[in-house]
Image: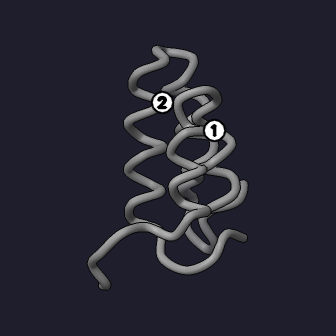
Amino acid sequence: MTSGVSPTSDVLLYFLAIIIPPLPVFFKRGLTAGESLESYFWINILLWILGWIPGIIHAWYIISRSEGVMR
């Protein structure tokens, strides 16, 4: 894990997460999380429906934990 400032694309994703939280999650993780049954995008949609702030917090968590380029 590297430490330091996020790339410019991540900074833009943080701002986008304030407006529409599911979009940055989709850009980072896609619709599914691979082989597991988890889907961070759909979890974020549910959190966003339940409350705007939980959706933002979850999106920021996904952005901060995701490494590499956007998919």
Is residue 33 depicted above or below 42 in this figure?
A: below
Is the C-beta separation of discs 1 and 2 under 8 Å?
Answer: yes
Q: Which one is earlier in the sequence, the residue at label 1 or at label 2? A: 1
Question: Which amino acid, by three-letter code, is at mark 1?
Answer: Pro
Relative image position of residue 10 (x, y in whole percent): 53, 60
Viewer-proximal residue among 36 and 59: 59
Using the image, tell me which numbered label, if any, was put on residue 56: none
**Disc 2: which residue:** 55
Q: Residue at x 70, y 59 (%)?
A: 30
Q: Quadrant of the N terminus?
A: bottom left
Q: Residue at x 60, y 65 (%)?
A: 33
**Disc 1: which residue:** 22
Which residue is at the far bottom? Answer: 1
Q: Residue at x 39, y 65 (%)?
A: 65
Query: As drawn, is 61 to the left or to the right of 8?
Result: left
Query: Which of the 4 image quadrants contains residue 21?
Result: top right
Query: As drawn, is 71 to the left or to the right of 22?
Result: right
Is residue 10 depicted above or below 41 in this figure?
A: below
Relative image position of residue 38 (x, y in whole percent): 54, 56
Q: Residue at x 58, y 50 (%)?
A: 13
Question: Which amino acid, by three-letter code, is at mark 2?
Answer: Gly
